[in-house]
Amino acid sequence: MPSPKQETVKVDLGGRTVTVPKGGLYDRYRMDTDLDEVARDPRVSGVDFFRELPKTRVDSPIGPTLTPNFYYRVSTARLTMLAPSRAIRSRLPRELAPLEVAPGLGLISVMFFRYDVCDIDFYTEAAIGIAVRPARHGKLGFFDLVAALKNEHLDSYVLSLPVSTEIAQVRGHDGYGFPKWVTGLDVDIDAQRTTARVANDAGGTDLALSTATPAQTAYPSGKRVSSLTSYTSLNGAWHSTLSQTNVLSAGTALVPRDVSLQVGEGRMAGDLRSLKPIRTIQFDVVSEGQLALHMPVPTSVHTR
């Protein structure tokens, strides 16, 4: 949420009123952000990635908007865990199937995000996600699994997606169909340390993470672009949402031993426990990146 000293203005999103920072990017540009101005922000490495992604005006459940939503400076952390396929299937819609690394074993993830400079202003986010088979075909391809583990392309179904601001909640829930709510949510990621804490309704800890950041490697803009396809149901119809990440600095730790993940009480903790995680097999941190989040589009999903 904006700090108490931060002046805010009210804006309408598809009939919902939300507050945003006065003079912020959304207040001034309504998603049609001036890239030259963003390029002058010292937190942003450059905007070439976005100049090659023209925006399109579309109608959506939150009213007319421009897509994609641009995130000019982001940092992310993801714990990938093994979990029993039976537990995973109990939380998946019947149209989706887990991506299995071995018979009876699937992949789940705990993710934390910090969006420092964005079309809808600063916010933080966390997620419990399930890696699923791509909905475009019925058979699991070996390359789907390889691409998922290498972070080149993931297909996911999200159980929890708390955020720290109203506009992110309304856009994500009403516009995309994601299970979003607003809560206290701190995420700090740099080249040395990664910490995050999600508060529950009582102000206690839902989930918290504290660990050293894996050694980071720098990449030229556009050299390493990964993608994530998330499936949601909007008004009874399946949709897919594509996000593209321009990775600028990132690192991975395999089978990390010194990751402190506190599973407290709350919606995220309950979702994670329901998946019965076995062990963490990979810890990925992007200490600097950029992101383009497209509006959801209708998609066909195989009947399983």
Image (cartoon, helix red, strand yellow):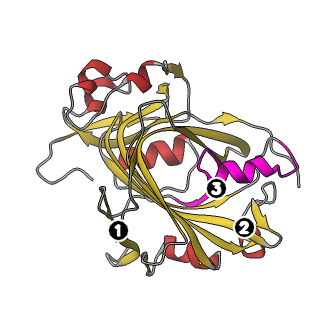
Stretch of the chain drawn in magenta: 137-160
Q: Looking at the rendering, which quadrant does residue 201 occupy? A: bottom left
Q: Hey, what amino acid is under mark 3? A: Leu
The image position of residue 115, as x and y in percent, is: 35, 46
Q: Residue at x 37, y 34 (%)?
A: 12
The image position of residue 288, as x and y in percent, is: 36, 45
Residue sitting nearer the eye, 81 or 116: 81
Q: CA distance from mark 3 to mark 1?
A: 21 Å
Q: Hey, what amino acid is under mark 2? A: Gly
Q: If you read the primary sequence from the N terminus, does the residue marked by circle 2 or circle 1 appear first?
A: 2
- Left or right relative to 269: residue 81: right
Image height of 220 relative to 267, above or below: above
Observer-side mark, 2 or 3, equals 3
Q: CA distance from mark 2 to mark 3?
A: 12 Å
Observer-side mark, 2 or 1, equals 1
As helix, strand or loop, the secondary structure at mark 2 comes to: strand
Q: Residue at x 31, y 56 (%)?
A: 191
- Left or right relative to 139: residue 203: left
- The residue beneath circle 3 is 149
Q: Residue at x 73, y 63 (%)?
A: 92
Residue 106: mark:
2
- Residue 145 inside the magenta-drawn segment: yes
- Left or right relative to 87: residue 53: left
- The residue beneath circle 1 is 212
Sort mark 3 into few (<14), some (14-19) or many (20+) by Cα contacts within 10 Å. Answer: some
Q: Hey, what amino acid is under mark 1? A: Ala
Q: Looking at the rendering, which quadrant does residue 25 occupy? A: top left
- Residue 221 inside the magenta-drawn segment: no
Q: Looking at the rendering, which quadrant does residue 32 occupy? A: top left
Sort mark 2 into few (<14), some (14-19) or many (20+) by Cα contacts within 10 Å. Answer: many
